[in-house]
Image (cartoon, rainbow, N blue to C red):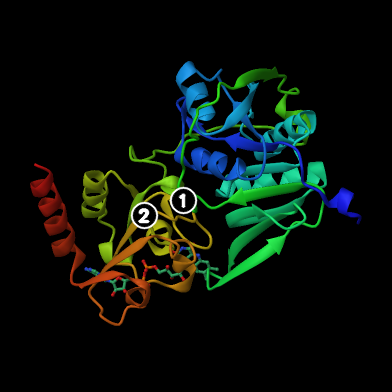
Amino acid sequence: MTPTERTHAGPVLVLVDHRDGIVVDTALELLTVARTLGTVHALWRGDHPDDGAIRTLGAHGAEIVHHLAAPHAGAELPAVVAHELGGVAESALANTVLLSSSTRHKEVAARTALTLGAGLVVDAVAVRRGADAQIEATVHAFAATWAARVEVARPRAVIAMTAGAVTPSPVQEALVPEVRPHDSGGAADVHGVRLLERTPRPTSHGPDLASARVVVAGGRGTEGDFSAVRELADVLGGAVGSTRVATDEGWIGAETQIGQTGVAVAPALYIGAGVSGAVHHRSGMQSAGTIVAINTDPEAPIFELADFGVVGDLSTVLPQLTAELRRRRA
Ligand SMILES: Cc1cc2nc3c(=O)[nH]c(=O)nc-3n(C[C@H](O)[C@H](O)[C@H](O)COP(=O)(O)OP(=O)(O)OC[C@H]3O[C@@H](n4cnc5c(N)ncnc54)[C@H](O)[C@@H]3O)c2cc1C
């Protein structure tokens, strides 16, 4: 491959996640990274972004917002999102695509890379340009016991970034992005899959787990009673997480599971209550800024990585902690 073939120059396209029309933190993180790599384009799927959302995107460096109404059934299927993301990347001449490394978006990332013939990196915690403008990324491998630096060896790159890996920051002078409408490209079944049924799962009213700044997780030690975990998460404005034991037991929804086969989180604060710290769980939370462990067993492996530990019964410690936080806030 010649140096010209290897270049990743051109705009960087960011898939923007939003909730009820409000840009989520992970999207702001991606925009913050994107502008260190090149001109920033954002892809907004769903109802037209309102003025506030467009201002937020401009404040974080987006020069162009591509809008795709995506009104058809099955619009959220990864095959469909990937098809549309790839199409917009082609039309915008974007050789680099950034999206969040959530479970669903990893599939979108893989499919988009296939569509574009791009090099794919998932679970990236940092992205930069190398000496010859190639995209390089740092990924955490083997339950985050290794940090690996990789270079994308194709002219195009699709990078899925771990939530919370960077701190989002606005540009000094906000941009006023141009909004470009796009066609959604037809019904879902043209992409080889068709939506048969959609059943919303009951979710907590707290922030999104993958991008939450505070996560309070409960494990087997809760014995199925997550009320103290939820109360502490509420008072801290955090998300509730869990171990696989807790989800396998049916104590809490599978969408809260943190770890190798669950969600990877990197909050500023992780509190684990009745969680042993098994390697499969650690791989999803050990990038947290500060780790607090509450466990009756002083030999529990989670204490090896905890910044603060309490050896005690969570049914006593959590309510005390919650009460003290409430008292201080009052
Ligand atoms: C292929 C594979 C993939 C997996 N993927 C995941 C994954 O994604 N996420 C995940 O979490 N697990 C995963 N697991 C399971 C993982 O290996 C562990 O079994 C699991 O994380 C343990 O959950 P736990 O900490 O709740 O339970 P345990 O390991 O049983 O630990 C419970 C802890 O609670 C403490 N405790 C008990 N009572 C109290 C109390 N009253 N107060 C305070 N502490 C108390 C105990 O001392 C103990 O340390 C996976 C396993 C496999 C094989």
Q: Please determine whether, in this image, residue 180 is positioned above or below residue 308.
A: above
Q: CA distance from mark 1 to mark 2?
A: 8 Å
Quarter of image, res 300 = bottom left
Q: Is residue 243 left or right of residue 221?
A: right
Residues under numbered marks 1 and 2 in contact, where contact means CB atoms less than 8 Å apart:
yes
Compare residues 45 and 242 and report the one nearer the observer.
Answer: 45
Residue 285 is situated, as x and y percent measured from the top left of the image, at 43, 62
Residue 155 is situated, as x and y percent measured from the top left of the image, at 82, 48
Q: Is residue 303 left or right of residue 75?
A: left
Identity of the residue drawn at 14% across and 56% down = 319
Q: Is residue 272 left or right of residue 188?
A: left
> What amino acid is found at the position of numbered circle 1 in the picture?
Gly
Residue 121 is situated, as x and y percent measured from the top left of the image, at 68, 55
Q: Secondary structure at mark 2?
A: loop
Give the number of the disc on residue 164: 1
Disc 1 CB within 8 Å of nearest ligand 1 atom: no
Residue bearing the label numbered 2: 268
Compare residues 313 and 137 and report the one nearer the observer.
Answer: 137
Give the number of the disc on residue 177: none
Q: Residue furthest right?
A: 2
| Quadrant for the N terminus in the image | bottom right
Compare residues 64 and 23 and report the one nearer the observer.
Answer: 64
